Amino acid sequence: MAAVKPPARKERRLLTPETHVEGFRLARAVRRVELVEDYVELIADLIDAGGEARQVDIAARMGVAQPTVARMLARMAEDGLVDKEPYRGVFLTPAGRRLAEESRDRHQVVEAFLLSIGVPAETARKDAEGIEHHVSRETLETMRRRLAKQG
């Protein structure tokens, strides 16, 4: 039996350090925005369900320690997205509420689109959680139009 040769590898040139830095810096910024969007969306859900969002509830649902939540909430307060009230919970500012609604809307569109193309419900829910933060406006609008045609 003759030996099978692996396919030839296409030679890749290493990017310049500056190009790498730019790409990684952008990726980190996107991850920070993604995390903030997850927090405001969860806070909105908790407020809508029970009137307030407590740090302990946020930590439990995010799967992180309370000090992690405290640091994030402090940053979000500095950015004008949340108000923290002593001995109460965390509340969204108008800017935080807008961001939560935009994030929730993207999630719903992406999830509905995935369901419309036959992705199982549980997988669509999980995948939408990640895709919602990275989908471009153009792609999101295309998904909306496709869903409108089907509906």
Image: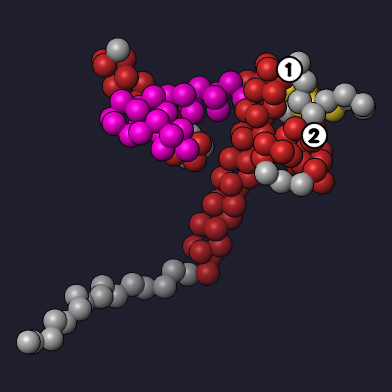
Q: Find residue 125 and name its label.
A: none
Q: Identify which amino acid the numbered label 2 is placed on.
A: Gln
Label 1: few (<14), some or many (≥20) within 10 Å? few
Q: Residue furthest top?
A: 151
Q: Residue at x 51, y 64 (%)?
A: 20
* Secondary-structure class at tag 1: helix
Which quarter of the figure is the C terminus placed in? Answer: top left
Q: Residue at x 63, y 41 (%)?
A: 35
Q: Is residue 90 above or below residue 63?
A: above
The answer to if 34 sits in the magenta stretch is no
Q: Is residue 1 above or below residue 25?
A: below
Which quarter of the figure is the N terminus placed in? Answer: bottom left
Does any portion of residue 85 appear in the rendered image? yes
Q: Earlier in the sequence, mark 1 or mark 2?
A: 1
The answer to if 110 sits in the magenta stretch is yes
Instruction: From the viewer's side, name the closer residue of 42 and 63.
Output: 63
Residues shaded magenta:
99-126
Residue hosting label 2: 55
Residue hosting label 1: 50
Q: Residue furthest left?
A: 1
Provide the major secondary structure of the magenta segment.
helix
* 77 displayed left or right of 15: right
Q: Residue at x 52, y 69 (%)?
A: 17
Query: What whole-number distance in Å separates the C-alpha atoms at marks 1 and 2?
Result: 13 Å
Q: Is residue 75 above or below residue 14?
A: above
